[in-house]
Image (spheres, rainbow, N blue to C red):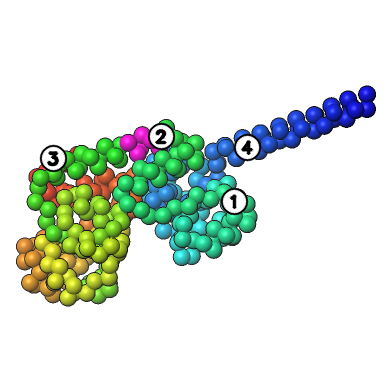
Amino acid sequence: MATGATTMTRLRGLVVIVAWLVFVADLQAQAPQRIVSIIPAVTEILFAIGAGPQVVGVGSYDNYPPEIGDLPRVGGLIDPDVEAILALRPNLVVLYITQVDLTTQLTRAGIPLFEYSHGTLADIPTTIRRLGNRTGHAAEADKVALDIEDGLVRIAEAVSRRHRPRTLLVIAREPYSLRNLFASGGSGFQHDMLELAGAKNVLDGTMRRAVQVTTEMILQAAPDVVIEVRTVERLSPAEIEKEMEVWNALPSLPAVQNQNVIFLTGSDLVIPGPRIVQAITRFALVLHPDAPLPTQ
């Protein structure tokens, strides 16, 4: 009898342990309800796939979609605010894979993480699907990803067999000056955007995402088109004209001679997220205005 009672006691204990393990596993599998995203692209993705109501904090440099306006800000790539993040009691934090110190601190605090890195154009739908699976929105994420993939194919078809102008994509420089100018190199999503829009990146031989270039390098590259992008949503016509006038310092540049210096504004042009088809279409429209491009 004693042996039987002991066996039953052990069995009951085993059942309790198994039930607890199942409960913990279910809890871990549940979609996170308090998400902090430090990354503008990921914040956009979360709202696009229907996970917006689960977001409780965003990066200090996030500005889209408008629904994030009242959410707490928790710093960014260089200046994450650990205390602010912890105060939000998140059960998922999305951060850059390069934020090693932040990863260590949040891991010690027992907070689940989703590590992100900027990749190529092809990585955007993959990231969207991964976030959908992680947040409980797999079906919605797959639809967003499929729409992007379809849009990219339609752009490629629209500009196929057209002349590909040699283009310099400028992503940053000093205001009203050609100093400290950075342009898209031959790798990364911005290079992919430019090429898919029907251009030939004049810096495609430089296998870096961003390249600091001098005026001598620009003259040597001799682009037929210069496209400048700014993250600000709006600049006055006078400000844009003043910014474009700085290129007159290079009168021998083909883009200047042919009046093909183009200035575009908007965060969609620099964020690898759900608006990527819209952004590439904007590039394609200035490169191939008569192409049968998809409408947004």
Q: Is residue 236 visible?
A: no
Q: How many marks?
A: 4
Q: Is residue 103 above or below residue 49?
A: below
Sequence-wise first label, 1 or 2:
1
Q: Tell me: 47 left or right of 35.
A: left
Q: Is residue 194 visible?
A: yes
Q: How far apart are the two marked residues, 3 and 2, measured between alpha carbons?
A: 28 Å
* Residue at image point 35% right, 39% down: 145
Badge 4 amino acid: Ala
Look at mark 2 in the image and give the residue it sits on: 140
Instruction: Quadrant for the C terminus, please.
Output: top left
Q: Which mark is residue 111?
A: 1
Look at mark 4 in the image and give the residue it sits on: 25
Circle 4 Cα neighbour tier, 10 Å, few/some/many (<14 / 14–19 / ≥20): few
Q: Is residue 196 magenta?
A: no
Q: How far apart are the two marked residues, 4 and 3, measured between alpha carbons?
A: 51 Å
